[in-house]
Image (tube, rainbow, N blue to C red):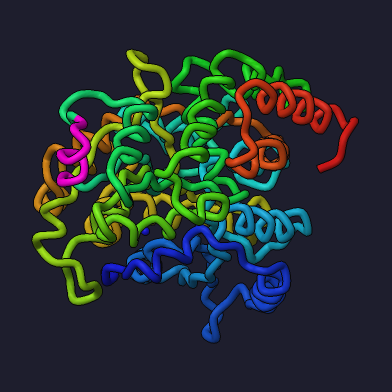
């Protein structure tokens, strides 16, 4: 996330939920894997999320050595299901979980549980972008290696913005974007509104953009202070309520994900859409899709919208960090493999092939990358990652996220006068063990 560019229908799988049966079947099958090849050479198993599979498989081959081989195994599509499968394995002290791709939100939880080996401090350096470097640190240690750093920008049809009279050369607010789409018959705003992690990514970015935060002291774990019932929380809820109540809301808003909004870009007058960096490659004309050069030339991009006019937005930061399982039989080999997998060269290859941006500053300077993307888009990505508003690095983030989903979903039910207060009470009670998810 070399590989061929995926079509929109393939992208639509990015946010869907796999059933528990499918996840369990995959976990069971993976448990039968041997730790050595037929010739007795150790085999490291690397669990991958679905993005950029072809490139990651090539990286596994390239990073295999005379001392060990690396084999890949695929995790479910949703970050939540990926976490569940890996957590089950590691809680059972599975020694075949050598390497794993972790959503940046879950590193602190896995490190706190003792499921990850601590890596050398120089795993991150001055070359590592600050927005992603913070995601691998826990309790004064480094517990994963950044592989790619993701962020969201505002994608839009240039012709739509012109028709709506919205000046995209200046920072725009969520209200302006929604009003602009609302003013053009058939135009929409694409977001991630399904009841899953990406919906909380949106909520977090809105709150951060209003100067707030979901947790003020996430390192306190269950004792963290919940800060949802604030002016920032109400500002965030107001944006969601405005979109849900407008004609700009897409018909599938309550189940929308990273992929469902893609087709609306070139349907009718088009859309404004917040989405990750893969979007550029998705629309770039190729043998794998039917987008024309004229359509591609009409694609625009801008910084993530402001929650509050005049206050700089805090774009989401995502991506993948590579962790080494605490129970691996081959800790030295696994750490060596993690360093190879996350090399700048491999980061650049992922960006060029799959639109998954580097976690390093030097990666952005690579000639292959500057040849593959417009300079202003690369600059936007890099600045957005540096200025991002990460989700709280809490060992109980999965619990907090689920509680927020339960109280903020569906978007049509969000009310700035009641949702933040209700959500704060519920999240606090869940953390204190006084309520169940």
Residue at 67 percent across and 61 percent down: it is 85
Q: Give the range drawn in magenta.
A: 158-166
Asked if residue 320 lies left or right of residue 52, the reply is: right
Q: Position of residue 175 (x, y in %)?
A: 38, 27
Task: State whether residue 89 appears in this view.
Answer: yes
Residue 292 appears in which quarter of the rendering?
A: bottom left
Q: In which quarter of the image is residue 241?
A: top right
Which quarter of the image is occupied by the N terminus?
A: bottom left
Is 306 inside the magenta-drawn segment? no
Q: Where is residue 142 in the image (x, y as percent from the top left)?
A: 53, 35
Image quadrant holding the C terminus, namely top right
Between residue 271 and residue 137, name the one nearer to us: 271
Q: Position of residue 285 (x, y in %)?
A: 16, 66
Q: Is the magenta stretch mostly helix, strand or loop?
A: helix
In terms of depth relative to the viewer, which is nearer, 384 or 53?
A: 384
Instruction: Check the image and name the residue furthest to the right.
Output: 434
Q: Identify the residue at horizontal 69%, vertical 56% (top origin).
A: 84
Task: Kindly identify the residue that appears in the image at 19 percent across and 44 percent down.
Answer: 300
In percent of the image, x 51 and y 38: which residue is there? 245
């Amino acid at each position: 996330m070399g590989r061929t560019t995926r079509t929109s229908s393939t992208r639509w799988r990015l946010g869907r939920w796999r059933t528990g049966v499918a996840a369990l079947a995959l976990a069971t099958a993976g448990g039968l894997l041997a730790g050595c090849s037929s010739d007795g050479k150790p085999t490291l198993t690397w669990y991958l999320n679905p993005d950029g599979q072809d490139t990651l498989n090539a990286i596994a081959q390239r990073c295999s050595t005379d001392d060990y081989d690396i084999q890949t195994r695929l995790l479910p599509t949703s970050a939540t299901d990926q976490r569940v499968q890996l957590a089950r394995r590691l809680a059972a002290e599975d020694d075949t979980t050598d390497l794993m791709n972790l959503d940046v939100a879950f590193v602190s939880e896995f490190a706190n549980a003792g499921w990850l080996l601590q890596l050398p401090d120089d795993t991150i350096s001055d070359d590592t972008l600050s927005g992603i470097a913070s995601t691998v640190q826990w309790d004064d240690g480094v517990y994963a290696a950044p592989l790619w750093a993701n962020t969201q920008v505002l994608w839009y049809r240039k012709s739509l913005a012109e028709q709506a009279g919205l000046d995209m050369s200046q920072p725009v607010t969520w209200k302006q974007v929604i009003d602009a789409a609302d003013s053009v018959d058939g135009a929409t705003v694409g977001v991630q509104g399904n009841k899953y992690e990406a919906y909380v990514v949106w909520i977090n970015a809105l709150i951060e953009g209003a100067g707030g935060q979901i947790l003020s002291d996430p390192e306190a774990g269950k004792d963290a202070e919940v800060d949802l019932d604030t002016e920032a929380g109400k500002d965030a809820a107001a944006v969601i309520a405005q979109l849900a109540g407008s004609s700009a809301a897409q018909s599938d808003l309550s189940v929308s994900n990273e992929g469902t909004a893609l087709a609306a870009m070139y349907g009718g007058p088009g859309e404004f859409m917040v989405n990750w960096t893969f979007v550029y490659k998705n629309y770039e004309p190729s043998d794998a899709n039917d987008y024309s050069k004229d359509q591609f030339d009409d694609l625009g991009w801008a910084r993530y919208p402001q929650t509050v006019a005049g206050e700089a937005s805090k774009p989401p930061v995502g991506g993948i960090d590579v962790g080494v399982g605490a129970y691996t039989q081959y800790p030295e080999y696994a750490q060596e493999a993690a360093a190879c997998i996350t090399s700048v060269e491999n980061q650049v290859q992922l960006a060029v092939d799959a639109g998954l941006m580097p976690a390093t500053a030097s990666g952005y300077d690579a000639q292959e990358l500057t040849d593959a993307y417009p300079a202003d888009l690369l600059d936007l990505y890099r600045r957005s990652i540096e200025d991002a508003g990460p989700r709280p690095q809490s060992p109980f983030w999965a619990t907090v996220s689920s509680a927020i989903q339960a109280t903020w979903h569906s978007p049509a039910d969000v009310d700035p006068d009641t949702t933040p207060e209700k959500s704060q009470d519920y999240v606090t009670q869940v953390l204190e063990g006084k309520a169940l998810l």
